[in-house]
């Protein structure tokens, strides 16, 4: 299935039904009076979080969603039927943005969460509501109101506990294959992974966490270079980052410079994202002679000035991966416990998520603004002002 994590759609709620103008007509009842019923409310459009979906590809082919209109009222004080609400399933982890105002309407983060994105129109009133002692035969009704219509942008971010980041070909896909049942493509060339991959790391019958393999970043990713800007946003849903570093790159590049470049891109994209707990994972140690591995790893840590956790692994053989996932599971379990027991910790976590979301939206909108300006500058379409040129004829 094709992975699509951004989509633009139009949603329109149903119009409310008009009120009815009617008078009672029965045999032997010469002055029956008004009996026009009300219209029905228009249907609303709701989005529902569904864990069975992991892509927005359905919205690529169907972009318009409309709820039912309410039915008009009828005589004998009969109200019109209300329009049925429209429920649209979206993946858990979807952010809903109003494209016209750039307002974040909602964040669908839970299974079954319902978000109303377009409110149905109100019903119109029949003439029965307007009778009075001075107006026994009112001919006044009210029409139903229009339903809301919105242009929405859906952005899906994978929901994971741990996110893998690093340069292309650092071994992230091999690592997630080694510790979970995920089977991303693995090959000996950069940008093998083109979409995020999720893997469930199981440590026991009821113990597991979710790991996300994010496509490789390059220098300039925060400004749109390569695949970075499109996929950096997925890291904002994670609790913990594994910074995977290739200690023996095939192009003989400097692992320290590569690690520093990735850290810089994180900070440029979202300063709050750069504050997330990050563990250094030195990968591909099996490519070095056994007697050199410790010295090379220690030198990388020293030059980086790294003060956080460090893990030495070989993803392809599995060496060191068990200790890595066990430590990650203990850390995630402890974090969840603290958030559950301490409201201050939970509020700090929510505040970080809000800040990361705001920074990610701002960075994305800045990129879209630059793209629109470039498109305007490159516009070669024929316009009325194309006549405003001076023509000089040479003799």
Image (cartoon, grey):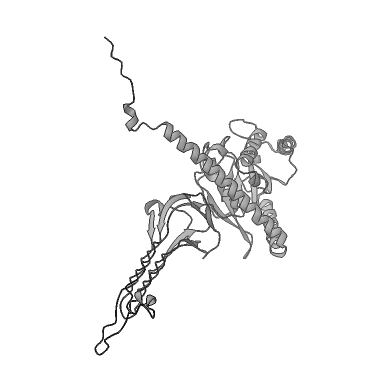
* Residue 149, image quadrant: bottom left
Residue under the image location 48 percent in, 56 percent down = 54
Furthest-bottom residue in view?
28
- In this view, the residue in front, 143 or 353, is 143
Q: Residue at x 53, y 57 (%)?
A: 106
Left or right side of 308 for 127: left
Q: How many marks?
A: 0
Q: Is residue 239 left or right of residue 157?
A: right
| Closer to the camera in the image, 177 or 8 | 8
The answer, for residue 36, to whether it is visible in the render is yes
The structure residue drawn at horizontal position 74% and vertical position 38%, both measured from the top left corner, is: 305
Residue 7 against residue 383 in the figure, above or below: below
Which residue sits furthest front? 134
The residue lying toward the viewer, choosing from 123 and 349, is: 123
Residue 4 in view here: no
> Horizontally, is 308 left or right of 395 in the view?
right
Q: Position of residue 117 (x, y in %)?
A: 47, 59
- Report the residue at 58% width, 31% height from top: 251
Residue 332: image location, x then y, percent: 67, 57
Residue 373, percent from left and from top: 46, 35
Percent coordinates x, y for residue 263 in the rendering: 65, 39
């Amino acid at each position: 299935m094709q992975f699509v994590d951004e989509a633009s759609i139009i949603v329109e709620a149903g119009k409310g039904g008009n009120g009815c103008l009617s008078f009672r007509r029965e045999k032997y009842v010469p002055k029956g009076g008004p009996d026009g019923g009300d219209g029905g409310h228009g249907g609303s459009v709701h989005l529902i979080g569904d864990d069975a979906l992991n892509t927005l590809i359905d919205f690529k082919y169907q972009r318009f969603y409309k709820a039912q209109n309410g039915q008009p009222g009828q005589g004998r004080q009969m109200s019109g039927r209300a329009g049925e609400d429209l429920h649209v399933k979206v993946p858990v982890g979807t952010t809903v943005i109003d494209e016209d105002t750039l307002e974040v309407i909602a964040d669908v983060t839970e299974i079954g969460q319902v978000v109303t994105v377009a409110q149905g129109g109100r019903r119109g009133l029949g003439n029965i509501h307007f009778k009075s002692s001075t107006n026994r035969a009112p001919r006044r009704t009210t029409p139903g109101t229009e339903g809301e219509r919105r242009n929405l942008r859906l952005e899906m971010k994978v929901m994971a506990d741990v996110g893998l980041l690093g340069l292309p070909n650092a071994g992230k896909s091999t690592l997630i294959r080694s510790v979970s049942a995920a089977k991303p493509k693995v090959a000996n060339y950069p940008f093998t992974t083109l979409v995020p991959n999720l893997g469930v790391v199981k440590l026991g019958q009821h113990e597991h966490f979710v790991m996300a393999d994010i496509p490789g970043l390059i220098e300039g990713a925060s400004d749109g270079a390569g695949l970075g800007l499109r996929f950096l946003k997925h890291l904002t849903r994670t609790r913990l980052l594994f910074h995977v570093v290739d200690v023996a790159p095939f192009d003989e590049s400097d692992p320290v410079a590569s690690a520093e470049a990735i850290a810089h891109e994180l900070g440029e994209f979202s300063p709050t994202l750069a504050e997330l707990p990050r563990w250094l994972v030195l990968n591909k140690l099996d490519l070095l002679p056994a007697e050199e591995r410790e010295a090379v790893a220690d030198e990388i840590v020293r030059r980086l000035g790294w003060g956080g956790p460090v893990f030495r692994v070989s993803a392809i053989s599995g060496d060191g991966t068990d200790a890595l996932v066990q430590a990650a599971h203990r850390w995630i379990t402890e974090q969840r416990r603290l958030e559950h027991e301490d409201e201050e910790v939970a509020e700090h976590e929510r505040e970080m998520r809000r800040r990361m979301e705001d920074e990610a939206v701002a960075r994305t909108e800045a990129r879209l603004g630059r793209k629109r300006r470039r498109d305007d500058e490159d516009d070669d379409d024929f316009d009325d002002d194309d006549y405003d040129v001076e023509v000089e004829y040479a003799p």
